[in-house]
């Protein structure tokens, strides 16, 4: 871990290579950090609200409890620890979050459209009403997550863990849920038009008001 980082130099954009830097509790709100190398950096408790992180590499970084409200996070967070982060209103379109840990994160109003979240841990995260269109969620852990009213249209949820997840009134049109686990999930009035459920586990799932329950009643 790189110690004795000059925070003012970081804020002024004078430091571009901060791999492994110790920036715990640093106030970097509103700073332009686009394209900077923050691989493996310690950003625990840091304030990155309204910060620009477009094309920044934060692979393996620790952002536990960081404030990322309204930030431009179109960056790479592969394998990063984002537990308890506040992502309210942040822009994560097309971001790389493969294998990241988002347990306890607050993504209220965040935009995850086309983001890569394959293998990410999002157990019990509240994604109510969040935009996840075209997102890659293959093998992601969304057990017990709240996805009520979320837009998951054309998302790839192949093999995802969605047991006990709340998908009430979620938009799953054209989504790929092949091999996904939806045991005891709530799909009440979800839009499942053209969704792929081949091999999915729907044991104990609530399908009232969906096209799936209608097709089951017809057979």
Image (spheres, helix red, strand yellow):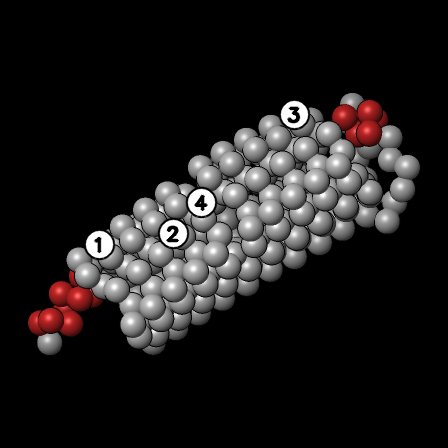
Q: CA distance from mark 2 to mark 4?
A: 14 Å
Tell me the mark number nearer the camera, choosing from 2 and 3: 2
Q: CA distance from mark 1 to mark 3?
A: 41 Å
Q: Which residue is mark 1?
A: 189
**Location of residue 105 in the rendering, given as x and y in whole percent from the top left corner:** 55, 47
Residue found farthest to the right:
4
How many marks are shown on the rendered structure?
A: 4
Instruction: Looking at the image, tell me whether mark 2 or mark 4 is earlier in sequence order.
Output: 4
Q: CA distance from mark 4 to mark 3?
A: 23 Å
- Please name the residue shown 49% across and 66% down the image: 139
- Name the disc covering residue 113, or none: 4
Tell me the mark number nearer the camera, choosing from 1 and 3: 1
Tell me the mark number nearer the camera, choosing from 4 and 3: 3
Question: Left or right: 115 with respect to 36?
Answer: left
- Please name the residue shown 34% across and 64% down the image: 185
Q: CA distance from mark 4 to mark 1?
A: 22 Å
Q: Which residue is mark 2?
A: 147
Element carrying mark 4: loop
Q: Which residue is mark 3?
A: 30
Res. 118 visible in picture: no
**Location of residue 111 in the rendering, given as x and y in whole percent from the top left corner:** 46, 40
Instruction: Looking at the image, tell me whether mark 4 or mark 1 is earlier in sequence order.
Output: 4
Tell me the mark number nearer the camera, choosing from 4 and 1: 1
Residue 10 location, quadrant: top right
Residue 129 location, quadrant: top left
**Location of residue 156 in the rendering, given as x and y in whole percent from the top left corner:** 41, 59
**Location of residue 123 in the rendering, given as x and y in whole percent from the top left corner:** 50, 59
Mark 3, residues whose alpha carbon is within 10 Å: few (<14), some, or many (≥20)?
Answer: some
Instruction: Looking at the image, tell me whether mark 4 or mark 3 is earlier in sequence order.
Output: 3
- Please name the residue shown 40% across and 67% down the image: 163
């Amino acid at each position: 871990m790189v110690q004795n980082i000059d925070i003012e130099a970081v804020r002024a954009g004078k430091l571009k290579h901060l791999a492994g830097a110790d920036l715990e509790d640093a106030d970097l709100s509103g700073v332009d950090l686009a394209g900077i190398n923050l691989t493996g950096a310690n950003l625990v408790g840091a304030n990155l609200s309204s910060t620009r992180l477009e094309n920044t590499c934060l692979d393996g970084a620790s952002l536990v409890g960081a404030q990322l409200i309204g930030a431009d996070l179109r960056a790479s967070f592969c394998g990063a620890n984002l537990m308890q982060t506040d992502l309210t209103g942040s822009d994560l379109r097309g971001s790389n979050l493969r294998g990241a840990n988002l347990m306890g994160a607050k993504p209220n109003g965040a935009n995850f459209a086309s983001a890569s979240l394959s293998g990410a841990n999002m157990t019990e995260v509240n994604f109510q009403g969040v935009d996840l269109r075209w997102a890659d969620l293959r093998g992601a852990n969304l057990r017990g997550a709240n996805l009520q009213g979320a837009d998951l249209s054309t998302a790839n949820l192949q093999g995802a863990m969605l047991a006990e997840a709340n998908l009430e009134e979620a938009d799953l049109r054209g989504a790929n849920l092949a091999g996904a686990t939806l045991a005891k999930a709530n799909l009440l009035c979800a839009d499942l038009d053209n969704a792929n459920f081949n091999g999915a586990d729907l044991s104990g799932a609530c399908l009232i008001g969906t096209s799936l329950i209608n097709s089951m009643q017809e057979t």
